[in-house]
Image (cartoon, rainbow, N blue to C red):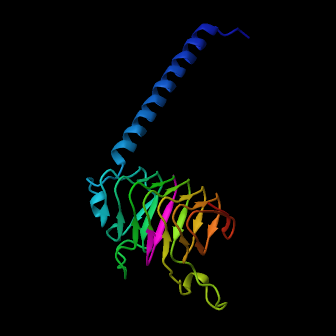
Amino acid sequence: MLDRDPIPDTAFRRALTGVKRASGELVHRGWELAVELGAIGPDTRRGRRFGQLGANSVICFPPNALFNEEYIRIGEGTLFGPQATLSAGMVPGQAMVTDPVISVGDRCLFGKGSAIVGHLEISVGDDVWTGHHVYITDQNHGYEDLGVPISMQVMPERPVSVGNGSWLGHGTVVLPGARIGNHVVVGANSVVTGDLPDNCVAAGVPARVIRQL
């Protein structure tokens, strides 16, 4: 069996590597352009659907789901990371009984993959920051009637509030009826179901105060 000439093979591999690198660079540059052009701000067509989207506020590209934006009000200088969900109601076009359903203050920062799903009233103050994948909702599923599928049972709604200057760690879940005070730290992966007073650190499932500041 004749030996193959290594020179053409090496040249081919070098050329192929160069093509891959150039193609990869084009992909990255294209994605960066898509992220820039796809961001939703107050002056964009999608941004004007909101009841309010304040100056210098941005919903990064790509969003996950945006429903019934007219019931959502966002202050100035607030940022939602990519893959965010902002939903008033469960389906597009749903008429809500309150307005706004979701209100978010100024200078807030919501991490990647976070979601606010409101049906009655969710109020987030100013300067609230979160880690990634934080979930806030004011509605839960009923489950006590064993003869009816959970998906078909009444879904009780209770208002939710998050006070000024608070920090919600990665993976925090805030459930109906939760009231988080001002300057509250909630530890990662906690589940908030009740009241957390001002100036405290809370953690756990359900979240409990572990330190008063």
Quadrant of res 188? bottom right
Q: Quadrant of residue 93?
A: bottom left
Q: Quadrant of the N terminus?
A: top right
- Count of numbered marks: 0
Residue depicted at 51% across the width and 26% down the height: 20
- Image position of 200 with respect to 8: above or below: below
| Side of 84 relative to 10 (left or right) | left
Between residue 115 and residue 23, name the one nearer to us. 115
Residue 125 horizontal/vertical position (percent): 44, 64
**Quarter of the image that includes the C terminus:** bottom right
Residue at horizontal 50 percent and vertical 81 percent from the top? 157
Q: Residue at x 29, y 53 (%)?
A: 55
| 150 shown above or below 186 | below
* x and y percentages locating residue 105 in the rendered image: 39, 62
For the record, the magenta segment spans 112-123
Query: In this rendering, is residue 65 above or below 62?
Result: below
Would residue 133 appear left or right of 38 to someone viewing this image? right
Q: Residue furthest front?
A: 213
Q: Is residue 192 magenta?
A: no
